[in-house]
Every structure is written in C-alpha cells, then in structure tokens.
Image (cartoon, grey):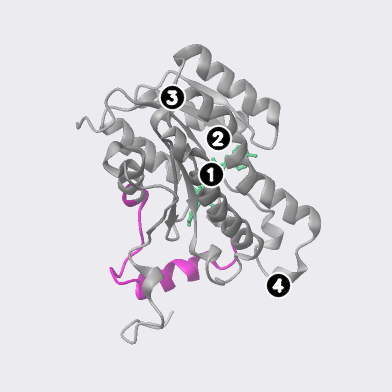
Amino acid sequence: RGTLMAGKRGVIMGVANDRSIAWGIAQAVAAQGGEIAFTYQGEALEKRVRPLAEGIGSKLVLPCDVSDDSSIDAAFDAIKAEWGGIDFVVHAIGFADKQFLRGRYMDTPKGAFLQAMDISVYSFVAVAQRAVPLMKPGGSLLTMSYLGAERVTPHYNVMGVAKAALEASVRYMAADLGKAGIRVNAISAGPIKTLAASGIGDFRYILKWNQYNAPLERNVTIEDVGGSGLYLLSDLSSGVTGEVHHVDCGYHIVGMKNPDAPDI
Ligand code: NAD
C-alpha cells in the first residue's frame, strides 16, 4: 500500500459495477491511502455500489442524479457536512439514448442531443460548481472522454459531439480555476467493455479493431485507466491542467490499419 493519496479525500461519481472505469480509479486511489465518497445514480445501482465502496473502507455512499440540480446539491451538502473539504472529484458519467448510438449522426433529434449534452457535458460543470467551494489549492477535477471527440468513430455519433464539448469544457474550466490552484483534466480512454459501452452499436468490433491496431496490441483495462487517473488526481501531476490524456494503448497515434492485423 502506497501513500500518494494519504490525507486526501474526494468524490468518485459514476461507479455502476466492478467493470466501471470509475471503479478502476477508485481502487488505485484507495491503494494509495485516499479516502473516497461514492455517488450512484438510483436505487438499483446502490445495491452494487454500496458493497464495493464498503469493501475499500468508504463510509460515504450517496445518491446523485446529475440531471437533477437538487440531487447534486444534496450530495455535496452531505459531503460538506461530513468532511468540510475535499481534494478531488472524479466525474465518470456519460449518457446518450442508445437508439441514436448507431445509424447516422445527422438523424439525432433535438431531445436526444440536449440530453446527451446535459448528462455528459454540463453535469461536469454543475458538479464543479458545488465541489470547488469545498476545495483548496492542489485540488484536482477529472472527467472521462473518448477519441470519438476528435475523430469520427463508428456509431459514437452524438456522444462524440458531447465529448468534444466536454474536452473544450475541461480547457475553459482549467483556465477559470487555475488562479485557485485547482487543476482540471480528462482521460481519453480506449474502449472498455462496460455497461455504458454496451449501448454503442458494434462495440465488439470496435474492441477488436483497437486491440489489433493499437501500438501495444491490446485493449486498455480499468486498471490502466486507474493508474493514469491516480497520477492526475495526485500531486505527481501538480503542473498539469487543461489536458486530455490518452490512455488507449497508443491507438490515437495510428493513421492506418496495422498491415499485420488479422481480419475481424
Ligand atoms: P459505466 O456504465 O460503468 O459508467 C457510466 C456511469 O454513468 C454509470 O455509473 C451511470 O450510473 C452514470 N450515469 C449515467 N447517467 C447518470 C445520471 N443522470 N446521473 C448520475 N450518473 C449517471 O461505464 P464507463 O464506461 O465506466 O463510463 C464512465 C465514463 O467513461 C463515461 O463518461 C464514458 O463515456 C467514459 N468512457 C468510456 C469508455 C468505454 O469504452 N467504456 C471509453 C472512453 C470513455
């Protein structure tokens, strides 16, 4: 057990189960002595999140639906009442109606577009509005993005547009919060088989494509993302803000198919 996060407390939002990226980050933070409050969306997920949280010694496990301002208020009020201050927040939350994570992007209706933007982009701002008043210099905010923000990837559609906005949001938030000594970063993770990913059309094909064509010739795990998340949350990255850090086995540097890759 290390001590990189000793004396630090923070909130991890977005654990749905033990395959969640947020859980990979939570395990890495806990292994370095960090104290974690978890939030979950809705009662059905509480049954999964509470035992995981308690298994790594967390006592604060709170409901928070980011589409509802009063729910975010209630979660951060409870955290303030219990702890007074926090050092980090992980926002590993995204949503788009899976009906539109296939077919043409141009067919996205306004309602689905706005919902994806609300839950996947604005919620990071809304969370920061409540979290930052509880933070001191040295604080760190982290969110999760995907390559579909930068380039067209199959079926990612409205989620790609939302992630592009999220990455821009990271830069503007980093500029706003720099004076206060608070850092804001994103990890752009390679594809991982999670609950959220199962909504994306042909996800198995995307996994195979990345595995065969990434320089490291494998897919990332939640442990890979956990290690990089730990870096961005800890003082090891004290000079890093406004960054979108790729944790994708190098896939984002590749320009063409690996000629040695087998057919999928
Ligand atoms: P996941 O399904 O385990 O986590 C998604 C989380 O979002 C869930 O815990 C869900 O409860 C939460 N959520 C959705 N709507 C919410 C709401 N209204 N209020 C509160 N929480 C809400 O899947 P994951 O893949 O671990 O996703 C975490 C983040 O990582 C997402 O932002 C996702 O877009 C991003 N990401 C995933 C991949 C991948 O391939 N899995 C790759 C890059 C980025």
SS category of the residue bearing label 3: strand
Q: Earlier in the sequence, mark 3 or mark 2?
A: 3
In percent of width and height, residue 163 lies at 57, 57
Determine if the magenta segment contains residue 239. Answer: no
- Give me the C-alpha separation between circle 1 and circle 4: 31 Å
Q: Which residues are magenta?
A: 200-224
- Give me the C-alpha separation between circle 2 and circle 1: 9 Å
SS category of the residue bearing label 1: helix
- Give me the C-alpha separation between circle 3 and circle 2: 12 Å
Q: Which mark is residue 86?
A: 3
In percent of width and height, residue 33 lies at 27, 27
Is any part of residue 7 visible from this angle?
Answer: yes
Name the image quarter holding the C terminus. Answer: bottom left
Q: Residues within 10 Å of mark 1 (few under 14, many from 20)?
A: many
Q: On the image, numbered disc 2 is attached to which residue?
A: 128
Q: On the image, numbered disc 4 is attached to which residue?
A: 104
Residue at the spot x=32%, y=45% of the render?
A: 239
Identity, as a three-letter code, of the amino acid under mark 4: Arg
Identity, as a three-letter code, of the amino acid under mark 3: Ile
- In the image, which is nearer the foreground, mark 4 or mark 3? 3
Determine if the magenta segment contains residue 218. Answer: yes
Do the CB atoms of the residues marked 1 and 3 lie less than 8 Å apart?
A: no
Q: Which mark is residue 200?
A: none
Q: Earlier in the sequence, mark 1 or mark 4?
A: 4
Q: Earlier in the sequence, mark 1 or mark 3?
A: 3
Identity, as a three-letter code, of the amino acid under mark 2: Ala
Reply above or below: 86 against 208. above
Mark 2, ligand 1, within 8 Å: the answer is no
Identity, as a three-letter code, of the amino acid under mark 1: Met
Q: Residues within 10 Å of mark 3 (few under 14, many from 20)?
A: many
